[in-house]
């Protein structure tokens, strides 16, 4: 197979990977480096080796919690506990927005 064919084939695969939306999972996982970076900074490296900004403390806190041990309701309860008596039901819409943003930015590993 000619080299240009291989390169063209690789480009097509990469393009499909970048354009395909991540499949929703019950216990989302942000990759370890992103979780670590989210603890101390706004700029986080995604799985495409790009630097993306998370100026919202809510989204950064969410990233630190996405280790695969919590489902959506456990994430809402964790945020409610941090907000000293907040109601998980009122946090749910914001949590959904933040999860969608994290997925769009390419930080979820599964």
Image (spheres, rainbow, N blue to C red):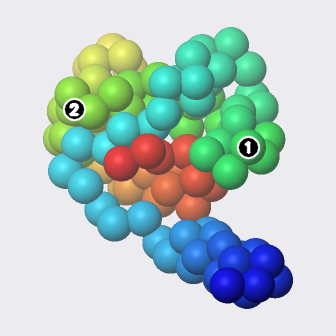
Q: Secondary structure at mark 1?
A: loop
User: 13 left or right of 4?
Assistant: left
Q: Is residue 8 visible?
A: no
Instruction: Give the mark, 1 or 2, whose residue is nearer the N terminus.
Output: 1
Q: Position of residue 50 (x, y in %)?
A: 77, 46
Up-down: is 95 above or below 60? below
Kindly check if marks 1 and 2 are in contact, taking CB atoms under 8 A apart as contact.
no
Mark 1 vs mark 2: in front: 1
Mark linked to residue 49: 1
Report crowding for label 1: few under 14, some 14 to 19, many 20 or more residues within 10 A (C-alpha).
few
Cα gap from disc 1 to disc 2, whole angstroms: 26 Å
Mark linked to residue 70: 2
User: 29 left or right of 5?
Assistant: left
In the figure, residue 7 lies in which quadrant? bottom right
Q: Position of residue 15 (x, y in %)?
A: 66, 77
In the figure, residue 88 lies in which quadrant? top left
Q: Is residue 76 visible?
A: yes
Instruction: Identify the residue at image location x=81%, y=83%.
Output: 4
Of all residues shown, which one is farthest toward the front?
A: 1
Q: Position of residue 64 (x, y in %)?
A: 47, 23
Mark linked to residue 57: none
Q: Position of residue 19 (x, y in %)?
A: 59, 77
Seen from the viewer's position, the closer of residues 109 and 36 is 109
Seen from the viewer's position, the closer of residues 103 and 88 is 103
Image mark count: 2
Instruction: Identify the residue at image location x=28%, y=24%.
Output: 78
């Amino acid at each position: 197979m000619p080299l240009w064919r291989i390169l063209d084939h690789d480009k097509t695969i990469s393009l499909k990977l970048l354009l395909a939306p991540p499949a929703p999972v019950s216990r989302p996982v942000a990759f370890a480096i992103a979780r670590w970076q989210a603890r101390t900074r706004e700029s986080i490296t995604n799985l495409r080796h790009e630097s993306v900004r998370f100026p919202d403390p809510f989204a950064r806190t969410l990233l630190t919690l996405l280790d695969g041990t919590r489902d959506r309701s456990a994430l809402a309860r964790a945020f409610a506990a941090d907000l000293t008596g907040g109601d998980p039901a009122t946090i749910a819409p914001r949590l959904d927005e933040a999860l969608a943003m994290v997925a769009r930015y390419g930080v979820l590993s599964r």
